[in-house]
Amino acid sequence: MMMSFNSLNYSTCTLARMSSHHSHNRTRKGPALATPPSSIISQTEESRNLADSMENSPLDTSSKRPDSAVFLTQENAVGIIGGLSIGTTLNFVRKLVTWSSKDGGNGLPFVLCSDPVLNKELSFHERGSSSFFDGKNGNLLKDHAPIVENLRHKRIFLEKSGARCIVMPCHISHSWYDEVAQGSSAPVLHMGECVAKELKEANLRPLEAGSTLRIGVLASDATLTAGFYQEKLQNEGFEVVLPDKATMEHTVIPSVEALKRKDIEGAQNLFRIALHVLLVRAVNTVIIASDDMRDLLPPDDPLLKKCVDPMDALARSTVEFVQSVERNA
């Protein structure tokens, strides 16, 4: 069942329910307690047809009344703040649905905020960020205020919507995690912490006798400059191995550019070289902290067995958190 509501002050407010059963989601009108994002999807109960339903449902981008806003309430839901692209966000939602429906589960209710303006802001920031290897991070300090404000508005909106926890399935958004999460009444899960925790619990052994556990990280300059993956991994006792400047300039960046030119074979060959450069440095696994890089290799590529996707860790951790709260309720 799909219901659409025109936002009274913002471009789109869409409530979608993917279920074979009928239920009632409460909406109320009132003073703006938070800025509603431009697109909102609320999902409850069964969600196996999520992707098809969302892709086949056009969003009305009209605005009507400027004096108030539509609010929806979905108690105990997972609040999701979309990131760099809608494709990435939907990829995370599919993972969340898969893990929450495993072993016959009914899935988790969630409220999803997706905002094209935020997509563009994050994309512009990532493209314009100074090089990590040059030690310059001026853009990170200068241009982040509008992004943080946007992310905080969405976090507050999700809190008011009844979210039990909030997640940001976007690597670059975690550059401002502390500012976004500050003052939140609902836990905001950190993707870097989730993947570091899973690697710690995996009880990995060093590949070289007497050495520390090494974890490789492949990411964009902007994500590497933010340094949160390095921090979270080091907090768990791992040694972090990053690609050097030559590897980034001659393999990683050109492979992403080749992908955008539709040169799939060239992109894959270059990225395989980048992975091998890290693997020969005796890393146990490589974290692919970039959506562009994640898509470079086909799902059945043997090299991916030596890699981890933080989105998987975030989805699993979200399910575990919600289930833990329900058990202790």
Image: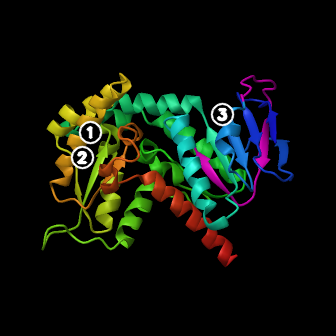
Quadrant in which residue 267 is drawn: top left
- Rounded to the nearest angstrom, the CA distance separating label 1 from label 2 is 6 Å
Of 292 and 110, the residue lying toward us: 292
Q: Counting residues from the N terminus, which is met first, the one under dot 3 or under dot 1?
A: 3
| Residue 36 visible in rendering | no
Q: In the picture provided, is 223 more to the left or to the right than 24?
A: left
Asked if marks 2 and 3 touch (Cβ < 8 Å), the reply is no
State the image coordinates of residue 217 (x, y, percent, origin top left).
Answer: 29, 50
Asked if marks 1 and 2 touch (Cβ < 8 Å), the reply is yes
Q: What residue span does the magenta drawing correspond to? A: 58-82
State yes or no: residue 255 in magenta: no
Secondary structure beneath dot 1 equals helix
CA neighbours of label 1 inside 10 A, class few (<14), some (14 to 19), many (20+):
many
Query: Which residue was labeled with disc 1?
Result: 271
Q: Give, as a three-letter code, the residue at label 1.
A: Phe
Secondary structure beneath dot 3 equals helix
Query: Which residue was labeled with disc 2?
Result: 275
Quadrant in which residue 261 is drawn: top left
Q: How many labels does the image show?
A: 3
Q: Counting residues from the N terminus, which is met first, the one under dot 2 or under dot 3?
A: 3
Q: Give, as a three-letter code, the residue at label 2.
A: Leu
Residue at position x 58%, y 48% in the image: 94
